[in-house]
Amino acid sequence: MYQFCFIFNSLTSFVKEKNVRIYEYIESHPGKTSSEIIKKLGISSSTARFHMNKLVEHKMVKQQKIDKIRYFTNDQNYEKQIRISLENNIHLKTIIDVLDNPKTLDEIFEKTKVSKSLLSKRLKVLRELGVVEKITREQKTVFAVVNN
C-alpha cells in the first residue's frame, strides 16, 4: 500500500508540474498556439492537449479556435493578444502587405511565393477575423483588405 501511495503521489506531482509549466508559459506568452506551446516546452501533443483542456475547464486560461488553430491566453483582453500573435505570423503579414488593391489568389501567390494551399488557409483566417474580404467580380474571385 505504501508503494502505491508513493507512486500515486509522484504521479500527481508530475501532473501538477506539467499543468504549472504550461500555465506559466501561457501566462508569459499569451496568444500562442498549442503547437508553439508543445514545441517550446518539449512535451507530446497528447499530454499538452490533456493539460491545456484541464486549464480551460478550470477557467485558468481561455482558448479561441480560428480555423483549425487554437490560441491560448489568460489575459482578460485575449482577443487582442490573439490578434497580436496573428500579426506576428510572417505569412499573414506578407499577405496583408501585398493586398494594397484587390488581387486574385494567383496574383497573391506571384507576389508572396507562399504556397496556394497555405494562402487559401491564411486568407480564410483573415476573412474570419474581418481583415480581408472575398469579392467575386466578372467570374473572378479577388481578395481585398477591409477598409474600416
Image (cartoon, helix red, strand yellow):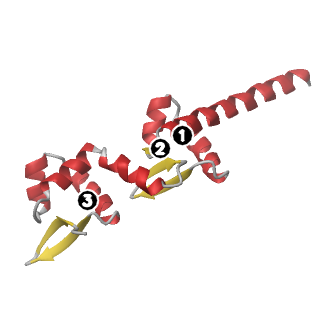
Question: Compared with residue 132, is residue 80 higher up or lower down, i.e. above or below?
Answer: above
Q: Are marks 2 and 3 in contact (CB under 8 Å)?
A: no
**Of the residues under marks 2 and 3, which one precedes in the sequence?**
2
Q: Residue at x 64, y 47 (%)?
A: 54
Secondary structure at badge 1 equals helix
The amino acid on which the numbered mark 2 sits, given as a three-letter code, is Pro
Task: Report x, y in % for residue 141.
Answer: 15, 70
* Label 1, residues with CA under 10 Å away: few <14, some 14-19, many ≥20: some
Nearest the viewer among 100 and 118 is 100
The answer to whether residue 60 shows anywhere in this view is yes
Q: What kind of element bears circle 3? A: helix
Left or right position of 126 against 58: left
Q: Residue furthest bottom?
A: 138
Give the residue type at disc 1.
Answer: Glu
Coordinates of residue 139 in the picture (x, y in percent): 10, 76
Q: Are marks 1 and 2 in contact (CB under 8 Å)?
A: yes
For residue 27, the mark is 1
Identify the residue at horizontal 41%, vertical 51% (top origin): 82
- Residue 116 visible, this orientation: no
Point 80% across, 28% down: residue: 9
Name the residue that disc number 3 marks: 123
Question: What is the three-letter code of the residue carrying label 3?
Answer: Leu
Find residue 91 and name its label. none
Q: Report, in whole angstroms, how far the alpha carbon at label 1 lies from the one at label 2.
A: 6 Å
Q: Position of residue 8 (x, y in %)?
A: 80, 29
Residue that numbered label 2 is attached to:
30
Task: Return the x and y of residue 122 as percentages of the image width and height.
Answer: 27, 55
